[in-house]
Image (cartoon, rainbow, N blue to C red):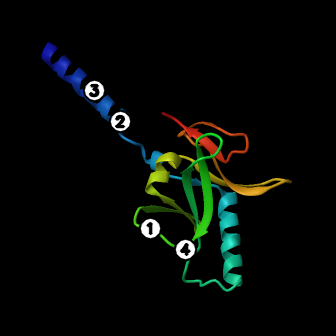
Amino acid sequence: QATQATQATQATQSTQATEATQPTETTQELVISEAAVRRIKELREEDEAGGADKNERTRLRVAVDAGGCSGFQYNFEFDTDINDDDKVFERDGAEIVVDEISLGFLAGSTVDYKEEMISSAFQISANPNAESGCGCGSSFSAKS
């Protein structure tokens, strides 16, 4: 009985260790807010109305670059290309592209679009990989 109890305890500890080191599905995902979906679609429609090729789908590219007042900064731009190391996230027809390295800094975050009296912009919120951020929300320091 002592041997069975020891084996059961070891199996439980092994399972717990495995579960603790396994990334959850949500850590690899990016949440896209309804406001971001709406704005991406609006901008894509404006591009198409301006003569952009409808076959070249415009996507929001989100990247993390070194810089900013906290060490890393978020970069948002529109792009029609998808590179080999990109992951595409989609919600209701709006697509966001993130490269593999940036995804390590963004996994589990929310891409949002905020409209305020003095500015309107895409932004990252609820980033579980950020230890702190600057007041304007455009840069952050990564957790160690």
Q: Amino acid at mark 3?
A: Thr
Mark 1 and mark 2: Cα distance apart in space: 29 Å
Name the secondary structure under disc 2: helix
Q: Which residue is rendered at x = 45% and y = 62% of the image? A: 86
Q: Position of residue 19 (x, y in %)?
A: 35, 35
Q: Vertical placement of 25 versus 143: above or below?
A: below
Q: Quadrant of the N terminus?
A: top left
Q: Position of residue 121 (x, y in %)?
A: 72, 57
Residue 49, quarter of picture: bottom right
Mark 1 and mark 4: Cα distance apart in space: 10 Å
Q: Residues within 10 Å of mark 2 (few under 14, many from 20)?
A: few
Q: Earlier in the sequence, mark 2 or mark 3?
A: 3
Per the image, the residue denoted by label 3 is 12
Per the image, the residue denoted by label 4 is 80
Q: Are marks 1 and 2 in contact (CB under 8 Å)?
A: no
Q: Residue furthest top?
A: 2
Q: Nearer the viewer, mark 1 or mark 3?
A: 1
| Image mark for residue 21 | 2
Q: Nearer the viewer, mark 2 or mark 3?
A: 2
Q: Position of residue 18 (x, y in %)?
A: 30, 34
Mark 2 and mark 4: Cα distance apart in space: 36 Å
Q: Amino acid at mark 1?
A: Asn
Q: Amino acid at mark 2?
A: Thr
Q: Which residue is rendered at x = 58% and y = 43% of the image? A: 127
Q: Are marks 2 and 3 in contact (CB under 8 Å)?
A: no
Q: Vertical placement of 143 versus 60: above or below?
A: above
- Identify which residue, 80 or 27, lies in the foreground: 80
Residue 2, quarter of picture: top left
Question: Can residue 1 be seen in the rendering of this structure?
Answer: no
Q: Nearer the viewer, mark 2 or mark 4?
A: 4
Per the image, the residue denoted by label 1 is 83
